[in-house]
Structure formats: C-alpha cells, structure tokens
Image (cartoon, rainbow, N blue to C red):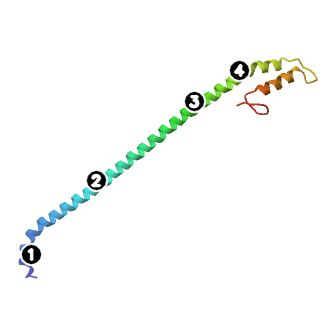
C-alpha cells in the first residue's frame, strides 16, 4: 500500500503526542481509582478499629458494672447474715425438747421479721 506511506509520514508525528497523552491520561485515571480504593479501604479499617474499640470499652464498662452489683449483693448478704446471727445463735443454743418449745417460737418470729418474708429465702 504505497499510497498510504505519504499519509502515514504526515500522520505519525502528529499521532505520537496524542497516543502518549492518552496513555498518560489513562495512567492518571487508573492511579486516581487506585488511590480512591486505598482511601476507602483505609477508612473502612479505621471504622472497623473504632467499632472494635467501642465494643472493648463497652465490655469493660459492663464488667465493672457487674462487679459493682456483685459487691453490693455480697454486702447485702453479709448484712442479712450479721442481722440474723443473733437469732440463729439463740435457736442453736436453745435446749432440746420433744415438743415445740421456745426454739420453734423464736424461729417463727425470726421468719416473720425476715426481710424476705415468710416462705421465701433471703437473697
């Protein structure tokens, strides 16, 4: 195709900068999209790390709250135990009888005054 040789000779020097420009523009666009996906991945990692930190903080808070409630319940139990120690001692030290004597009466009185009420277990 000899008739294309003069056209190619005229067109080639003009196409080289266009082709190079298109390649450069394509590289820039590809670089932009790669950077954008990297930024998104970094943002997602930051959000995930913040979520994990929030979960860890909540677990620590829940643990501290549970320990405080457990300590309060233990203190309440010790108060009830101390309050009932004298009644328990009186019942244990009561003389053994074959009938319902003062020990049973004291036990019933204690149950009626108990914070939990008759028929219910304290705590």
Where is residue 120? Give x, y as percent.
76, 33
Please name the residue that numbered disc 4 is placed on: 82
Where is residue 115? Give x, y as percent.
73, 28
In-front residue for pair 107/43 = 107
Packing grade of label 2 (10 A; few <14, some 14-19, many >=20) is few
In the rendered image, the quadrant that contains the C terminus is: top right
The quarter of the picture where residue 34 lies is bottom left
Packing grade of label 1 (10 A; few <14, some 14-19, many >=20) is few
Q: Earlier in the sequence, mark 2 or mark 4?
A: 2
Callout 3–callout 1 Cβ contact below 8 Å: no
Q: Please tell me whether residue 45 is drawn above or below residue 3 in the rendered image.
A: above
Q: Earlier in the sequence, mark 3 or mark 1?
A: 1
Packing grade of label 4 (10 A; few <14, some 14-19, many >=20) is few
Q: Earlier in the sequence, mark 1 or mark 4?
A: 1
Nearer to us: label 2 or label 4: 4
Q: Is residue 61 left or right of residue 81?
A: left
Q: Is residue 68 left or right of residue 45?
A: right
Q: Earlier in the sequence, mark 3 or mark 2?
A: 2
Marks 2 and 1 sit apart, C-alpha to C-alpha, by 39 Å
Q: Please tell me the numbered disc located at residue 35.
A: 2
Where is residue 77? Give x, y as percent.
68, 26
Q: Residue at x 61, y 31 (%)?
A: 70
Q: Secondary structure at mark 3?
A: helix
Q: Residue at x 18, y 64 (%)?
A: 22
Marks 2 and 4 sit apart, C-alpha to C-alpha, by 70 Å
Q: Please tell me the numbered disc located at residue 8.
A: 1
Marks 3 and 1 sit apart, C-alpha to C-alpha, by 87 Å
Please name the residue that numbered disc 3 is placed on: 68
């Amino acid at each position: 195709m000899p008739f294309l040789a003069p056209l190619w000779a005229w067109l080639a020097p003009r196409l080289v900068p266009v082709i190079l420009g298109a390649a450069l523009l394509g590289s820039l666009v590809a670089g932009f999209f790669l950077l954008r996906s990297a930024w998104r991945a970094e943002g997602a990692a930051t959000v995930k790390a913040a979520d994990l930190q929030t979960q860890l903080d909540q677990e620590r808070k829940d643990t501290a709250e549970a320990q405080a409630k457990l300590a309060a319940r233990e203190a309440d139990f010790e108060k009830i135990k101390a309050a009932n120690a004298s009644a328990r001692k009186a019942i244990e030290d009561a003389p053994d009888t074959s009938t319902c004597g003062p020990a049973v009466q004291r036990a019933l009185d204690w149950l009626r005054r108990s914070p939990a009420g008759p028929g219910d277990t304290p705590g």
